[in-house]
Image (tube, rainbow, N blue to C red):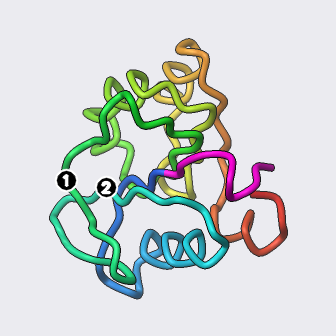
């Protein structure tokens, strides 16, 4: 578990659409005080924060990446994830893939197959 002050959280697959889990997780993370980067397929806004289509630079310390992409779409993002060297990646339900998990583990990244919303609701984030 990390505290909001510790580091940035990146929501991969962020969507402006309020019914999407990525949007709900982004809003909950912001409400909890976490500094959140929103990376989506198209630019937009969530709670006044920009959703960008560009990965943050390596100078940005990302602690956790919470994934809301299908395994097929996630595959093309693995190099970028590994280059940021986050401490952990959360694979939310429907994003899991054993090959992707293995690649992240080999890169020294902790992988959790969990639901970010559940982790937040139960104080385990």
Separation (CA) of disc 1 from disc 2: 6 Å
> Is-magenta flag for residue 3?
yes
Mark seen at residue 39: 2
The quarter of the displayed image where residue 87 is located: top right
Question: Of helix, strand and loop, which one carries label 1?
Answer: loop
Q: Which image quadrant: the C terminus?
A: bottom right
Identify the residue position indicated by label 1 in the image.
53
Residue 111 percent across, percent down from the top left: 64, 34
Residue 98 vertical position relative to residue 49 in the rendered view, above or below: above
Mark seen at residue 118: none
Tell me the residue at 56%/56% (across/down): 92
The quarter of the displayed image where residue 105 is located: top right
Crowding near pointer 1: few (<14 within 10 Å), some, many (20+)? some
Tell me the residue at 50%/35% (across/down): 61
> Is-magenta flag for residue 5?
yes
Instruction: Name the N-terminal-most of marks 1 and 2.
Output: 2
Q: Nearer the viewer, residue 66 or 69?
A: 66
Would you say 41 lies left or right of 14 here? left
Residue 18 vertical position relative to residue 95 in the rendered view, above or below: below
Give the tally of numbered discs: 2
Tell me the residue at 42%/75% (across/down): 23
Q: Which residues are magenta?
A: 1-9
Residue 39 percent across, percent down from the top left: 31, 55
Question: Of helix, strand and loop, which one carries label 2?
Answer: strand
Residue 37 percent across, percent down from the top left: 40, 56
Residue 74 percent across, percent down from the top left: 34, 41
């Amino acid at each position: 578990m990390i505290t909001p002050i510790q580091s940035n959280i990146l929501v991969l697959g962020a969507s402006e659409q309020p019914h999407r889990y990525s949007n709900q997780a982004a809003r909950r993370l912001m409400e909890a005080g976490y500094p959140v980067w929103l990376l989506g397929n198209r630019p937009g806004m969530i709670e006044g924060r920009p959703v960008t289509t560009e990965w943050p630079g390596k100078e940005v310390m990302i602690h956790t990446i919470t994934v809301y992409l299908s395994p097929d779409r996630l595959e093309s993002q693995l190099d970028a994830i590994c280059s940021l060297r986050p401490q952990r990646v959360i694979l939310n339900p429907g994003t899991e893939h054993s090959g992707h998990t293995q690649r992240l583990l080999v890169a020294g990244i902790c992988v959790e197959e969990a639901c970010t919303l559940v982790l937040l609701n139960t104080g385990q984030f």
